[in-house]
Image (spheres, rainbow, N blue to C red):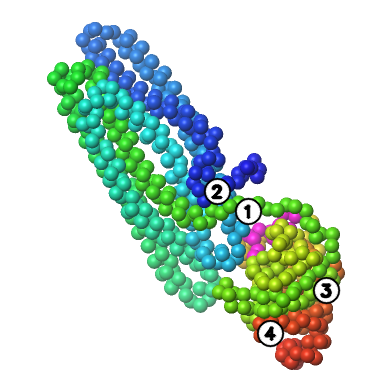
């Protein structure tokens, strides 16, 4: 089924056959043109023999030059038709390869963007990039070569063998005993080709990871004076990559001359026995045309058979890449574009007896309960590593939970990705800025004005002082902005796309108290009909919050600020230490 005119959804993306099946139309045209072209290839040896015989007859005076001209014109006409079919076949083979490359990359992309953050973190970026680029290229190239060689080698070999058997079946069998040897050697080299290509791919992944690490952390290495150490490490990765690449290419390419030599050994038999046939002392009676046709046909067949041996190596190389890519080729996850069934209801959150665990099963938070209504700002705080951020990620589906979290009466775990994105907005620790302009980092393709939201986060004046204002490019990951500007830009984006529930994880960590209070004023205005879950370790504003969830000893205490001050000594001490420190500053 098609998602649009450009992208096709693969029912079983983890099977190579699925990609062939999807491109049946171009493959059908490849089949027709390939058969015509490759059967037509025997015209070459046939006419070469006829031309040689005609030339001999002209020297003997039995034929005139006109016969040679007529034969040459017919030869050119046949070759023209054959080459047209070759062009058609190559065009549709390339179209098949291009379509397959696009479809395979699309399925891989869909799989990656729908993986959890934890799943992505388990594999380094260099490995993912290597799989998404070079491994897909290798897979598609192997499929293209296989599709091409089915005709350019398979069909034409059958045609050549049929012609050779027609002229002299005994000499064909005698001369052809060398050809299987090339296939046998290629088969025996399969494990070596596979192993060296696997090592090469792994080395490429390590090199890509080292490259990205060196660029991303260049300032850190410079500040700590570790550039020489990291450069030395990078050089080691580069040397290993070069060594693995040479070894892989050696096993893949250097055997081709050997295949050619082995396959061509049969020509010695043809010269010896074929000469006897011409003289009338062989197994059959030949003229010069037959001898020339047979020898030409055999040499072309031998070269084709040696290329088939090389094809085996190319397919083995693709097989290595496919094994690396296959675990990422998941069923296509189609975005749910159904209308949001909760959009006409007031914001409402009810968390009941929720337990959150680590991947190993150890509880992080147990029996957690709290609730919120539209217009409320709920502060979430606690000691370092108490589970604040983990709780925030539960709301966006990144962390599983036990118990019940109901939003407007519907269980959170039953929400589709689309429904969740239309009910919950989230801002995490990392700004996750794109290498684009300031306004595009906020709008994400929307058309509304972004300046009011830059004003909300106290960034508007700084933007106006920039040469290109909101069209200023932020650089890779926001590198051209300060840490505080990055955090406020990310907050502006979250407020711009604010839904019924806003989960903000430490949004004020990079701003001073005055800026924090100014931003909070706008946040209070924006939250009149929304619920804001404010995760932070800074408690200056907590007296102004509607409710507070204090995480302690793996559980939580819920109430307003005044109640927690009266009933919880740890919370009181934490708040007074911050408030007192600010007063004494």
Who comes first in sequence, dot 3 or dot 4? 3
Residue drawn at x 46%, y 56% as measured from the top left: 324
- For marks 4 and 2, give the CA distance: 47 Å
Q: Tell me where residue 254 appears, x and y as whole percent.
A: 30, 47
Quick check: can you spot residue 545?
yes
Examine the structure image and report whether residue 28 is included in the region drawn in magenta. no
Q: Which residue is mark 2?
A: 12
Q: Is residue 526 visible?
A: no
Neighbour class for label 4 at 10 Å: few (<14), some, many (≥20)?
some
Residues under labels 3 and 2: Cα distance?
A: 47 Å
Mark with earlier residue (1, 2):
2
Which of the 4 quarters of the picture holds residue 115?
Answer: bottom right
Residue at x-position 40% and y-position 20%: 78
| Residue that numbered label 3 is attached to | 376
SS under mark 1: loop
Measure the alpha-carbon separation of dots 1 and 4.
Answer: 38 Å
Tell me the CA gap for discs 1 and 3. 35 Å
Name the residue tied to disc 4.
552
């Amino acid at each position: 089924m098609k998602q649009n005119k450009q992208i096709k959804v693969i029912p079983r993306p983890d099977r190579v056959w699925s990609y062939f099946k999807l491109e049946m139309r171009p493959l059908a045209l490849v089949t027709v043109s390939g058969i015509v072209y490759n059967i037509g290839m025997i015209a070459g040896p046939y006419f070469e023999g006829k031309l040689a015989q005609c030339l001999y007859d002209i020297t003997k005076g039995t034929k005139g030059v006109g016969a040679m001209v007529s034969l040459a014109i017919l030869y050119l006409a046949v070759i023209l038709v054959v080459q047209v079919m070759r062009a058609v076949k190559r065009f549709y083979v390339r179209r098949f390869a291009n379509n397959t490359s696009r479809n395979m990359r699309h399925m891989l992309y869909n799989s990656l963007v729908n993986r959890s953050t934890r799943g992505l973190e388990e594999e380094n970026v260099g490995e993912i990039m290597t799989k998404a680029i070079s491994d897909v290229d290798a897979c598609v190239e192997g499929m293209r070569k296989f599709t091409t060689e089915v005709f350019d080698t398979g069909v034409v070999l059958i045609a050549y063998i049929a012609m050779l058997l027609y002229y002299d079946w005994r000499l064909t069998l005698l001369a052809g005993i060398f050809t299987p040897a090339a296939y046998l050697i290629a088969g025996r080299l399969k494990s070596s080709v596979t192993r060296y290509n696997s090592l090469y791919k792994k080395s490429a992944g390590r090199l890509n990871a080292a490259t990205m690490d060196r660029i991303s952390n260049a300032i850190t290495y410079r500040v700590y004076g570790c550039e020489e150490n990291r450069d030395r490490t990078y050089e080691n990765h580069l040397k290993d990559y070069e060594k693995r690449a040479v070894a892989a290419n050696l096993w893949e390419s250097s055997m081709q001359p050997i295949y050619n030599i082995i396959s061509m050994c049969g020509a010695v038999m043809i010269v010896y026995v074929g000469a006897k046939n011409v003289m009338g002392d062989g197994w059959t009676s030949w003229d010069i045309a037959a001898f020339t046709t047979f020898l030409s046909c055999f040499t072309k067949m031998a070269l084709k058979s040696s290329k088939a041996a090389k094809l085996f190596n190319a397919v083995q190389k693709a097989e290595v890449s496919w094994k690396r890519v296959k675990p990422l080729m998941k069923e296509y996850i189609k975005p749910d574009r159904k209308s949001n069934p909760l959009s006409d209801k007031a914001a409402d959150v009810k968390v009941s007896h929720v337990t959150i665990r680590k991947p190993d099963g150890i509880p992080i938070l147990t029996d957690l309960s709290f609730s919120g209504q539209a217009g409320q700002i709920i502060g979430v705080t606690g000691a370092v590593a108490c589970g604040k951020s983990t709780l925030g990620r539960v709301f966006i589906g990144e962390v599983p939970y036990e118990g019940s979290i109901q939003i407007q009466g519907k269980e959170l775990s039953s929400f589709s990705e689309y429904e969740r994105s239309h009910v919950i907005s989230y801002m995490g620790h990392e700004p996750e800025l794109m290498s684009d302009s300031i306004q595009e980092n906020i709008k994400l393709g929307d058309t509304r004005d972004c300046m009011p939201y830059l004003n909300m986060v106290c960034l508007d004046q700084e933007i106006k002082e920039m040469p290109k204002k909101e069209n200023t490019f932020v650089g890779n990951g926001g590198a051209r902005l300060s840490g505080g500007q990055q955090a406020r830009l990310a907050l502006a984006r979250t407020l711009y796309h604010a839904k019924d529930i806003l989960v903000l994880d430490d949004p004020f960590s990079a701003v001073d108290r005055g800026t924090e209070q100014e931003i909070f004023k706008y946040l209070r205005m924006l939250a009149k009909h929304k619920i804001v879950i404010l995760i932070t370790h800074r408690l200056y504003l907590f007296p102004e919050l509607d409710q507070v969830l204090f995480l302690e000893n793996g559980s939580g205490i819920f109430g307003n600020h005044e109640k927690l001050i009266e009933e919880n000594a740890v919370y009181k001490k934490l708040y007074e230490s911050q408030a007192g420190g600010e007063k004494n500053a």
